[in-house]
Image (cartoon, rainbow, N blue to C red):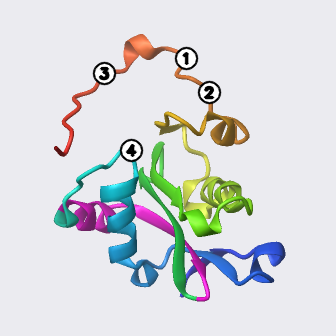
Amino acid sequence: MKTVMNDNHFLEKGYIISTDKTLIDFDVVHHYLANESYWAQGIPAERLRNAIENSMCFGIYKQNKQAGFARVVTDKATFAYICDVFVLPEHRRLGLSKWLIQTIKQHPELQGLRRWSLATSDAHGLYEQFGFKEISRPERWMEIFTPYK
């Protein structure tokens, strides 16, 4: 198992964060993203499988059960996009989301990147703690947005 970061505070409570994709409970992750998230409503299972396969994934586990998740789309040299971040409701209010973002930002393969990005409608306070700000030059950014439904 490739464990990225073990924090004694969370270890004592039975939590780990790992990048080992074999630990991911796909059904739990897919259910949350497809049914409970605002950003990936209706994502088809096969599309999510492909996204997981082609991303760095960080899972939060408590006694080997999925407690949270995040994906990082990156070339590991210049750019990283953090997405699909969630902590299941029964594991919230413990600081796990902060630990997850800290773990991602400190991962050895993600050091020295020129640009980090993410999109959120409700977690600005969390990400600001790690240096994220509104896009400084939004006029330079463009997108094609195609919802799943």
Choose between 49 and 56: the one closer to the eye: 49
Task: Indicate which label's residue lies in the foreground, 3 or 4.
Answer: 4
Q: Secondary structure at mark 3?
A: loop
Q: Amino acid at mark 4?
A: Tyr
Give the spatial CA distance, label 2 vs label 4: 21 Å
Question: What stretch of residues is rendered in magenta?
Answer: 47-63
Image x and y of residue 136, in percent: 55, 17
Image x and y of residue 18, in percent: 56, 76
User: Which residue is identified by label 1?
Assistant: 136
Image x and y of residue 74, in percent: 42, 51
Label whose residue precedes the other's in the sequence (2 or 4) = 4
User: Which residue is identified by label 2?
Assistant: 133
Q: Secondary structure at mark 2?
A: loop
Residue contact at pointers 1 and 2, CB within 8 angstroms: yes
User: Which residue is identified by label 4?
Assistant: 38
Q: In the image, is residue 21 part of the stretch drawn in magenta? A: no
Q: Secondary structure at mark 4?
A: loop
Image x and y of residue 145, in percent: 23, 31
Q: Amino acid at mark 3?
A: Met
Residue contact at pointers 3 and 4, CB within 8 angstroms: no
Task: Indicate which label's residue lies in the foreground, 2 or 4.
Answer: 4
Label whose residue precedes the other's in the sequence (1 or 4) = 4
